[in-house]
Amino acid sequence: MTIEQLAFYVISATALLSALLVVSLKNFVRSIFLFFLTLFSMAGLFVFALADFVAVTQLVIYVGGVLVLMIFAFLLSNRELLNNPEASEQSGFLHYLPGITVSVVFLGVLLMVLLKLDPGEFQWIQQSKENTLKPTDNTIHYLGINIMTRYLLPFEVVSVLLLMALIGAAHLARKEKEQ
């Protein structure tokens, strides 16, 4: 096993483990910091996929922007929860039933699509086998052209998502005390 493979497995395991802990821990502050670790590990995986620009963008936008907004909104708006985290926790299986149901349905749909998928049907899969990236390729040039032409709609959806996160954080920070 080479050092690159070992680093890939360590980063992948870190991303998976921290993502599982984010959704399973009941302490919101720890979940937010584990979410930071998950996003940082994903940026490392983007580096292994030769998507260096996407990795830097991941760090700047999600780790540096959205996550900091989440931390400030949480710390400014939820003082009662910080003082007594057990007060808002609900226990029991019924509390988790909606999330489990949605997860099982999405897993079923994903497995059904994967079982019916024939990779030979799609032309873009056949073309992708011919076009492989090399570490010396200028990926930023092609990424910029694709973002502004082919992937303009998803790029704008991400910008709306970031705007919603900013507005939500500002709303939570300005929340007035209830009497």
Image: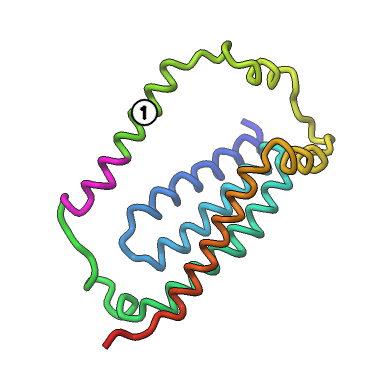
107 is higher (above) or lower (below) than 23: above
Give the image location of residue 177, x and y in percent.
Answer: 34, 86
Instruction: Name the chief secondary structure element in magenta.
Output: helix
In which quadrant will I find the C terminus? bottom left
Give the image location of residue 25, x and y in percent.
Answer: 33, 58
Instruction: Specify the quadrant of the image occupied by residue 130.
Output: top right
- For the point 45% across and 81% down, the residue is 174
- For the point 22% across and 73% down, the residue is 87
- For the point 64% across and 47% down, the residue is 155
Q: Tell me if residue 100 is in the magenta stretch.
A: yes
Q: In terms of depth relative to the viewer, which is nearer, 85 or 115?
A: 115
User: What are the residue bounds of the magenta stretch?
Assistant: 93-102
55 is higher (above) or lower (below) than 173: above
Left or right: residue 140 compared with residue 28: right
Q: In terms of depth relative to the viewer, which is nearer, 176 or 137?
A: 176
What residue is pinned by disc 1? 109
Helix, strand or loop under label 1: helix
Instruction: Specify the quadrant of the image occupied by residue 104.
Output: top left
Q: Tell me if residue 60 is in the magenta stretch.
A: no
